[in-house]
Amino acid sequence: MSLGDLLEAFQSTSVQARNLGRCYQVWKNMLTDKKRPTIFLGLSGPLIAAGQGKVIRDLIRYHMVDVVVSTGAILYQDLYQALGFKHYIGSPTADDVELRDMAIDRIYDTYVDEEKFEDLDRLIGRSVEKLDPRGYSSREVLEFLGKNIPAGESILSLAAKEGIPVFSPALIDSSIGIGLTLNYGETRARGKPGFVLDAVRDNYELVQILVHSPRTAVIYVGGGTPKNWVNDGIVMANYHYQREGEGHYYAIQVTTDVPHWGGLSGSTLDEAMSWGKVSRSATKAMAFIEASVALPLLFGALYDRRKEWGPRSPPDFRWDGDHIKD
């Protein structure tokens, strides 16, 4: 069997295998929809340590997504690896005090080099010195880093090349944020104005994408801020244009969080319908599976069936500052 055969067969099984098969089918529907919905990919969790960097880059490469919304940590660790630094196989039962003495940071069962993290933090701080002193959205900052940090292929460099916007609405809560703070402190000490990360501009740019899309679709890997932010965009778009619009037309999520604790990461896509964030007529599916298992299976099955939906062109977002030209 190919992976396409496997995920299609999953739809006739039960429990989470069936749910994963349904997620595959909904994603395939997004890709074959003649109205060409704008597909948002929300990313959270230790995906780079879990070996998903190439999967995410291939989703961008084959235009299976149109906008990426990620935690800063995922983008940072992918850039760290693109610079030739390593993630090492470790153990979740390691002596963490001993690891600290050796400047080794642990991400569950994976190790990274604290000294190399410091090097990258400082490289980011030096790189953004080239930016003019004004307010920037995370999209602008991340596109700049993708174009200006010399490294092998990264999520940021490939997205910049393919015209795929990348947002990180909580960018400051990451090692990229540490590098930006180093730059802020140094420019302040020199008494010079520096660039400013403008979170409200992020919101406005998200609204621009939403209102220039015939319909929207969302793929949430994990939950957290990326999921909440993209969903809130529907509310912001409705407020901004003083109309009550439909929510996301397609929606899938793979997560290990569960609904009964009441948190957003595990909340169902049905719950989002009560807020108007997911359309009442949406095609949707959720699978409660860990992302390092689910994501490569979904990508592999869709890639296997690419003749049925591809080739797919990149989105045509022509930015004029914080505004998309009609």
Image (cartoon, grey):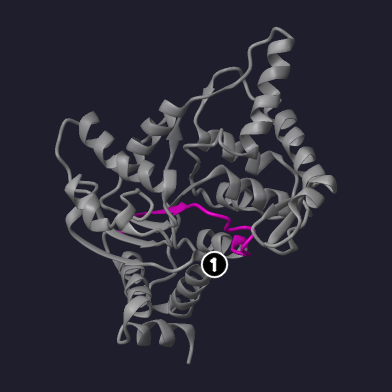
**Would you say the magenta stretch is mainly helix, strand or loop?**
loop
Visible in this render: residue 130? Answer: no
Residue at the location (71% across, 64% down)? 91
SS under mark 1 = helix
x then y, percent, for residue 66: 43, 53
Of residue 57 and residue 99, the one placed in the foreground of this image is 99
Q: Is residue 52 magenta?
A: yes
Is residue 264 toward the left or the right of residue 294 in the image? Answer: left
Of residue 55 and residue 149, the one placed in the foreground of this image is 55
Q: Residue furthest right?
A: 102
Visible in this render: residue 68? Answer: yes
- Amino acid type at circle 1 is Ser
How many other residues sit within 10 Å of disc 1, few (<14), some (14-19) or many (≥20)? some
Position above or below: 41 against 236: below
Residue at the location (36% across, 56% down)? 266
Q: Is residue 323 magenta?
A: no
x then y, percent, for residue 242: 16, 30
x then y, percent, for residue 205: 39, 34
Is residue 310 toward the left or the right of residue 151 in the image? Answer: left
Is residue 6 toward the left or the right of residue 92 in the image? Answer: left
Figure quadrant of residue 174:
top right
Of residue 142 and residue 308, the one placed in the foreground of this image is 142
- Where are the magenta residues, as a range? 36-53
Is residue 251 toward the left or the right of residue 6 in the image? Answer: left
Q: Which residue is under mark 1?
A: 292
